[in-house]
Image (cartoon, grey):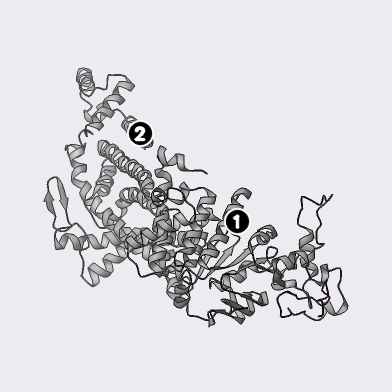
Amino acid sequence: MPAFLLKRLLNAAGVMLAVAFIAFLIFRFVGDPVELMLNEQASQAQRDELRARLGLDKGFVLQFATFVGNALRGDFGISYRNQQEVFTLIAERFPATFELVLVATFLSLAIGIPLGVYTAIRRDSLLAKALQFISVLGVSLPSFALGILFILVFSVTLQWLPAFGRGETVQLGWWSTGLLTTSGRKALILPGVTLSLFQITLVMRLVRAEMMETMRTEFIRFARARGLTMRSVHFRHALRNCLMPVITVTGLQIGNLIAFALVTETVFQWPGMGLLFVQAVTFVDIPVMAAYLIVVSFIFVSLNTLVDLTYAWVDPRLREDALSGAANAR
Amino acid sequence: MTAPLLSVSDLRIVFDGRHGPLTALDGVSFAIAPGEILGVVGESGAGKSLTGTAVIGLLDPPGRISGGEIRLDGQRIDNLPPEAMRKLRGRRIGAIFQDPLTSLHPLLTVGEQLVETITTHLPVSASVARTRALSLLREVGIPAAETRIDQYPHQFSGGMRQRVVIALALCAEPKLIIADEPTTALDVSIQAQITTLLKRLCREHGTAIMLVTHDMGVIAETADRVAVMYAGRIVEIGPVEEVTRRPRHPYTAGLMASIPSVHARHAQLNQIDGAMPRLNAIPDGCAFNPRCGRVQTFCRENKPGLPPGLHGAACHVPLMEPVHA
């Protein structure tokens, strides 16, 4: 197990280094930062002085090492646009995105899994067929169209829910949460549902496919032959066997949700990282773009590693330590 | 013969296909006495597993029972509502399947699977169920049951897993066990152990077994009586000794002749010419007629019935005329 853990962590570190390299290259592709920061009248001495101060006179490798070292300490430089620490900017925006993604993930599992089980075990019922049909819509409808539709119906026409923003938030240390106030929770509903709809259908279709596969296996037939209740056969025996791919997909999708929340965030003017990134792109705010890339990648990589570790928790066959390995005759 | 534990009479199973129903089981009748082991033998597709599946009520669409009846202890069970049938499965009829590697849930410990099966059928607490699970594991010959009970199926060898499967079938002391090819997936050396175990448990618990297999050797060692199936019908039924020594149906005779023997040195194994017909092409009259050496004109027209009695063959021209007293 420790060897497995170490391998996973080294893997993750390798990927992060590669991402940092790509982020570092962004700075070089968009031109000389010294030219960007000084005006045309600046003397050569001034340029050299700034170059030295920024460490740009050093070799390429040394510059990259400095970049990685700074990033490790959470120092992503200063935003070109509003002269704030990039790290502070992202830290301010992160809770908003995270809470949105959390709600969307929760909805996708809480709704997607039961629907998947239902459509699998009652696959000939009218409702199951209807759900299956609707899920095609869910997969193919772009989230910005859906978001705008929701705003039109629930905010403009019915005036039940706010059309934009996070509502009131409560500060818990550096974390600002909208979950503790009524207006905060209300503001979460529309963007949360919009973001989760694709996930719900994805989870539902995945669970349905896996359940139908599992229901055909011998161990389910044997469980039925032993007279176990259908409830237990479906939920304890069959569903458990489907959890592995659900965990994988959910884990990876959380990364996707964070990255692609920017569309939903733009539609609902949700003050999260996605909106920050979209604004950064508009103003060619490179440090923010680079930091966003690194932070999102970091979340991706962490989730992947976590998913791998969860496998071992769900599947005893991967938990194998040296002791029980010896008892395994096959 | 005492009152039968299981009696199947004129059982018909059809599969609803696109071109109308296909008859897979055509008027199968047999009985099993309490504590008796009935071997059911036949080629793949003869309908032997299907019969077992129908008895435990696990026949799934498009298959359905279209006629006949199944009685357990005199009570008709083929038309029970699903929930009543569910309660009966495991409690009064146990099942053992072919492949122990895939019969057990890979993500639940052996103990969890045993305890759940016990508490489903018997009104006992989880701790009592665990004690019972332990004694079952010991009974089926699993060493160090105290540690093994908390292990997962993948930590057991094939033979050990089949023992666990047997323990699971025995959880609620059913009076009948349907064993569908219980030794086919095992090594030859393990096969003998498992058949011996089954036989011993059957004797000790007074359990009857319907032993479905294509292996005549297993039948000869284990069963009291044997039913030979061909193309969805029972062609011969009788005590194992009788059927193996003096087969009456030409198909059974062919089957016996094709068993390799250590004593007789054949240059080539005997075989029956042709193949069993597909479900949509079963010939009129006796289903075996195109392959039969003794075929007569009426064999192609009239379906032979299985005569009553201890040993009978569904054949118009049986190999050995019954001795008239």
Chain for mark 2?
A
- Locate residue A133: give its quadrant: bottom left
- Identity, as a three-letter code, of the amino acid under mark 2: Leu
Region of the chain picked out in magenta, as a range: B308-319
Magenta-colored segment: predominant secondary structure: loop
Identify the element where label 2 is drawn: helix
Q: Is residue B3 above or below residue A196?
A: below
| Lateral position of residue A322 relative to residue B315, left or right | left
Quadrant occupied by the N terminus of chain B:
bottom right
Task: Tell me: B215 left or right of A173.
Answer: right
Image quarter where the C terminus of chain B lies is bottom right
User: Where is mark 1, residue-wise?
Assistant: B183
Picture quadrant of residue B282 = bottom right
- Residue A147 placement (x, y as % from top left): 30, 61
Above or below, B63 relative to A102: below
| Residue placed furthest toward the front | B325
Residue B154 locus on image (x, y percent): 47, 48
Label 1 and label 2: CA atoms lie apart by 43 Å
- Residue A249 visible: yes
Does the magenta-highlighted stretch encompass residue B314?
A: yes
Whether B128 is drawn above or below A60: the answer is below
Mark 2 crowd level (few <14, some 14–19, many ≥20, 10 Å Cα): few
What residue does disc 2 label?
Answer: A6
Residue B305 point in image, percent of width and height:
75, 80
Whether residue A139 can be seen here: no
